[in-house]
Amino acid sequence: PVDTTHGPYPLILFSHGVTARGVVYESVLKGWASAGYVVAAPDYPLSNTNAPGGVDFGRGVADVKNQPADASFVITQVLKLDKANKLVGGTIDQHHIGAAGHSLGGITTYGLVYSSCCRDRRITAAIPMSGIIGLVEPGENYFQGVNTPLLSLHGNADPLVPYQGDVDGYTRAKPPKFFLTFLGAGHVIPFLGGTDLPAVTLEKATVDFWDRYLKASTAALGHLR
């Protein structure tokens, strides 16, 4: 049963990477849920492991232009179901919503929160991991009149999504913004979670960020820094 004593709980929409599924990131998402968040982690139609006809890397990446709209749809449905007490007992905070994602999901998150074409104004904080701007629409169309709090995470040895590309995109963002570099990390680890120091750091940093910008915790920003 859902513990309603400390609710309502903010909602986080999490987007998986290409050829993955939401459940792959269970370790990270459980950490967020344990910290008092409801997490929705949908499998996207063409980029998830079980896509009809088999997942195709190129086709999955190409569909990223449609994934922000998919994410918005899922948010709408989750809020609607919870309001009707058909999900987690009406315990979602309808006014504090975060968005996060890894790899193609990080690219989706940038599009969902910061692009001109696909921005969902309900999002109040965002954590893209191993992501980059410029795929949902041209890079110059991001961060236009948007100051939604941002925490970007990236390994500086990422062979798939260039680290410097994320840094360059981050410079366009307006404060409040934070960039966490995992030194020597590639594209996948530590973004799937775990018990080693980088994974624990990821969980603690992201929870502190969520606590500050989704729960208005005055102490959380100091912990993050």
Image (tube, helix red, strand yellow):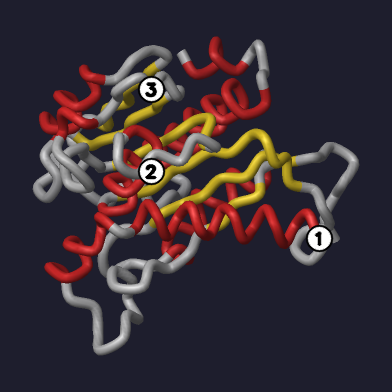
Query: Which element is circle 1 on?
Result: loop
Q: Which mark is residue 208?
A: none
- The extreme right residue here reads 5
**Is 101 situated left or right of 37 in this image?**
left
Q: Quadrant of residue 216?
A: top right
What residue is drawn where x is 85% and y is 61%?
1
- The extreme front residue here reads 117
Rendered view: 23 above or below 197: below
Q: Residues within 10 Å of mark 3 (few under 14, many from 20)?
A: some
Query: Which element is circle 3 on?
Result: loop
Disc 2 marks a residue whose amino acid type is: Leu
Badge 2 vs badge 3, beta-carbon distance below 8 Å: no
What residue is drawn where x is 40% and y is 26%?
150
Determine which residue is flagged by label 1: 84
Residue 74 at what x, y percent from top left?
Answer: 53, 59
Marks 1 and 3, the one that precedes in the sequence: 1
Determine which residue is flagged by label 2: 112
For the residues labelled 2 and 3, the Cα–Cα distance comes to 12 Å
Determine which residue is flagged by label 3: 146
**Is 119 situated left or right of 103 in this image?**
right
Q: Quadrant of residue 100?
A: top left
Residue sitting nearer the eye, 175 or 65 = 65
Q: Quadrant of residue 19?
A: bottom left
Total numbered badges shown on the rendered structure:
3
For the residues labelled 2 and 1, the Cα–Cα distance comes to 26 Å
Disc 3 marks a residue whose amino acid type is: Val
Residue 17 at what x, y percent from top left?
Answer: 30, 58
